[in-house]
Image: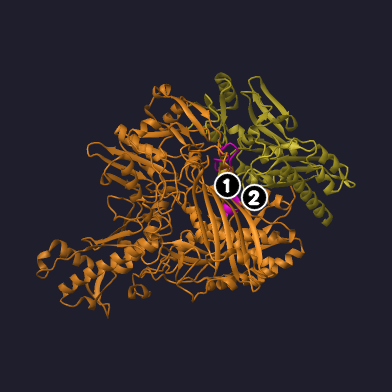
Amino acid sequence: MSVTTRYDRPNSYIGKSVPRPNAVRLLHGRGRYVDDKVLPRMLHAAFLRSPHAHARILRIDAAAARSMPGVVAVFDGNDIAQVMTPWVGVLTHLSGMRSPPQPALARDVARWQGEPVVMVVAHSRAAAEDALERIEVEYEPLVPVCDMQAALAPEAPRIHPELDSNLCWERKIEVGDVDAAFAAQGATVVERSFTFGRHTGVTLEPRAVIADYDPAEDRLTMHYSGQAPHMMQAVIARHLNMPEARVRVVAQDVGGSFGIKIHTYGDEMATLAASKLLRRPVKFVADRLESFQSDIHARDHRITARAAIDGEGRLTAVEIDDITGIGPYSVYPRSSGIEGNQVINLTGAPYDLPAYRARLRVVFQNKVPMCQYRAVGHPIAMAVMEGLMDEMAAASGRDPAELRRLNLRADDSYPSASPQGMRFADLSHQACLEKLLDLMDYKTLRAECDRLRQQGVYRGIGLVSMVEVTNPSPMFYGVGGAPIAAQDGASVRLDASGAVHVSNSITEQGQGTEAILAQIAAEVMGVDISTVHVVTGDTAVVPYGGGTWASRGAGIGGEAMYQAARALRQQILATAAAILQTRPEKLDLCEGQVVDADSLEPRIPLSDLARMVYYRGNELPEGLQPELIASRHFKVSDYPFVFTNGAMASYVEVDPETGMVKLLGHWVVEDVGTILNEKLVDEQIRGGVVQGIGGALFEECLYSQDGQLLNATMADYLVPMASEMLDIHIAHVVTPTRTSELGAKGAGEAGTAGAPGAVMNAVNDALRPLGAHMAQMPMTPERILRALGRV
Amino acid sequence: MKSSSFAYRRAATAEEAVALAREAGEDARFLAGGQSLLAALNFRLDEPCMLIDIGRIGALRGIRRVEGALKIGALTRHAEIAASVEIAKHLPLVAQAIHEVAHPAIRNRGTFGGSIALADAAAEMPACALALGARMHLLGPDGPRRVAADEFFLGLYETALEPGELLTHVEIPIPPAGACHGFAELARRRGDYAMAGLAMMLGPRTGAGRDWARIVFFGIADRAVRSPSAEAAIVAGAAPEECAACATDGLDVFGDMNAAESTKRHYAAVLLRRELDRISDEENRV
């Protein structure tokens, strides 16, 4: 670790808020997004989507569309099925999960409003859309199954007749004597029912793909706006029946992903199939309307939960029952079971908890498929548990901060495990809570709330203690049979000019991946960061690895980068030692030079060394075969996940006459282990908090009774905007993870995980003197008025 | 989301625009700022045969003082209204409300006349025009005519404009001395269409009451609507709570995704009471 602790020497980048090297390019409008790319002979795809939530497809008449000007081809589900096999979105380790094969385009039955049914490929998107209007599809409407509770009723119509019910998966957990804990004398027991609405990711750049099949080489290139190129490569190869090595996936700039762009989408897969059938490049860019109707949705839970504390305020038991609606298919290849699984795995995780019972039911319904979105399951688990903590505090006359102090896992208690079997190490719940209370000046704020209440102003404070799953091991997906790598690879090489080229299997989604890779490589290699060149996202170029998901980029890809750079550094020092007739440990790298380790006196520039190796190998000592390239892979071992923890607080004012919530303050203390770039970490947390606030107050996919999505525009689907947001104050506690040398944990999802619970608790704190309580998200003004009995 | 194809013509004068519209028939549309029309085209909610671009007709742009009124050209951008000294001085209701019209980028392109002619039920400018008793200047194939705001807004996106008729100016009388205004709206996000909004003008005080009152709610019905019950109560000098209690009496109120009908009635009452309270507080302070 000597390299990373010498902050005062040149080329110390790890831990510093280095500006992102790619920011200038993006600000110049020189981004390389999929829609910026224009290939020779490229065609454009548009999709006719089901107007019904559930309907049998009786007849498709595309004759008129085929003869429209500019139209090259029209494909229906049967056409695409000739070259593409359907997929099944189950994981074997989620035992008992079931989901029928899903075709790229609906065949026989359409199962959500927005499911692609017919594809038109034309010379322009406008021509393709003109042709869509001329396609006639005869549907026989079937009874839509939309409400997830009603979907489980024995008499409910079945979405998949081959299954005996609309249940996709069920899991139960029981540890300790839960009933005894709830029945114990002196226990304070609270029970609440929560509803978490559907929302979605709303990436600034929509999903986009160019499929470019070259029959001469039997090679398919996919220009992709997505998170996990190698996973997509495997998925495409498998379902287009091609050798994996003949499929290349290239993801350059990506305008946000948030978990939306890591799944198998029928429209994208059909675009790949169309390119293979037509032997021409085909572009598909989802427009905003079809993004709302086809990007995965998130959350959608109905939960009943209760918890008990004993007379001393010690948590004795938690019980949770979660029903979650996932649309008509479990999404491939990650499945739609992980969200609910995380909810029951993580509820109560920050606390010493002796007894726990959970039941999860994952239910099919005729709505847009639901799957993993930023902070998968966490916001639900945290909001439920933290909501119960505040209710128990109120019911037992304790301060909410005090009740948490009493029950948080002790900072000196690790490693430890939860009743669910989650294994924790290197966490700092107590330190984070104390730092948070200090940062926000909790006591003063409390007093302010109390004083203003006397004046009829209703303000509230909400606290959250939380964990986040980051840096997953193969126990997340790979163990369940999915073609998803949990390891990442990095390579680094020195070119003849002394510049450093690195590549890595983690990907840039706008979060700054390439910046931290450059920081790590530059510091270890002792070079100026401007001489480090980073490549990510291209399966033909980068080492094999997982990509961007589950807050793993810095912790796994960053560690691989660190190890690869250390290896190359050793190789360079060995070469230099041979040239300079000294020992490698007497040398170091600094400012692009091999230097004397003690005096930092320059001995030979890296560029001279490289040129000698590459051009004048004859001058090298006999037998020396320098390797100026190194690669390393890294995966987390010994622990299934690297948990992070944090504490968060929200301060709000509720107008009881209008139900409007004004955000007054938001504070986060987070322990992400070693911080590689504080500015990037903080912006990840802030962005995450804003998305969490979106789910808490604004965002919801609204459906009619018969499964029509009602608000599929940016005017009607409310994302949080700058004018509603506030300064988000961030502080850190640093406990490096023992699972890597760098010690970095993940930071990408914590904000989203904790913010909804914090805001909900703050709203409820404000409403408590009025006798009202909110347990439904988003907490819209009208829902608050209803809770208050005003409307 | 690509619009279907259409013909495009640019008019140099209002007369030429009207003549082009007459030639093209009912499926032609006038294009001003394009902030609502182009979205409708891209959604294919509207598939006109021709767009007649009036954007470069200089005579339709700008704010002029005329006898007892301000005459606002239909092409005047929202941003120009917001920056206008004349508006700030003579029409403080408009000056206040204009900042709630969508977002800066939309205010830079969107036009005052476009907002009036579209007559969105939740838009601020039609409500202000109604509260201020504006007169709409229209130009059609048969020449110009004027329509009072009370007769102009007829229903959901429905106005007195005949097919092919162009809104050229909006003439807004300058309120008399002693009159005052109120404006408030509730939107879930700044710049969104309001769940409920209030634009009002109160005439000079007469004892406890007012000489006259024009109370307009927007975002709660099929168009901006006056509340005769509230106006009568205010003129009669009723207390703010009483005026608020009858705010939506006799009005057809429609719910939407953000607020049900009952919530909108509640909001209308809250907004009116709060604005009357505020005005009363301010007047008592003077």
Given residues A488 and A352, the one toward you in this image is: A352
Q: Bounds of the magenta span? A: A693-715
In the image shown, does A314 or A442 lie closer to the viewer? A314
- Element marked by disc 2: loop
Label 1: chain letter? A
Mark 1 neighbour density, 10 Å: few (under 14) some (14–19) many (20 or more): many
Discs 1, 2: same chain: yes
Q: Position of residue A310 (x, y in %)?
A: 64, 71
Relative to B7, say whether A558 is above or below. Answer: below
Q: The residue tagged with tag 1: helix, strand or loop? A: loop
Is there a contact, CB below 8 Å, between mark 1 and mark 2?
Answer: yes
Q: Amino acid at mark 1?
A: Glu
Q: Earlier in the sequence, mark 1 or mark 2?
A: 1
Residue at point 85%, 39% (across, down): B232
Read off the residue under disc 2.
A780
Image quarter of the N terminus of chain A: bottom left
Question: How does the figure colour the protein chain or chains?
Answer: by chain
User: Is A704 a magenta residue?
Assistant: yes
- The chain displayed orange equals A
Which residue, given by chain and number where applicable, does mark 1 sit on? A700
Q: Position of residue B8 (x, y in %)?
A: 50, 27
Query: Which amino acid type is marked by label 2?
Result: Thr
Where does residue B195 sit, x and y in percent of width and height?
67, 44
- B151 with respect to B51 (left or right): right
Q: Quadrant of residue B111 in the image?
A: top right
Q: Is residue B227 placed above or below B191 in the rendered structure?
A: above
Residue A58, placed above or below residue A19 = above
Which color is chain B depicted in?
yellow
Residue B29, horizontal then vertical, whole percent: 57, 27
Q: Is residue A726 visible?
A: no
Tell me the chain of label 2: A
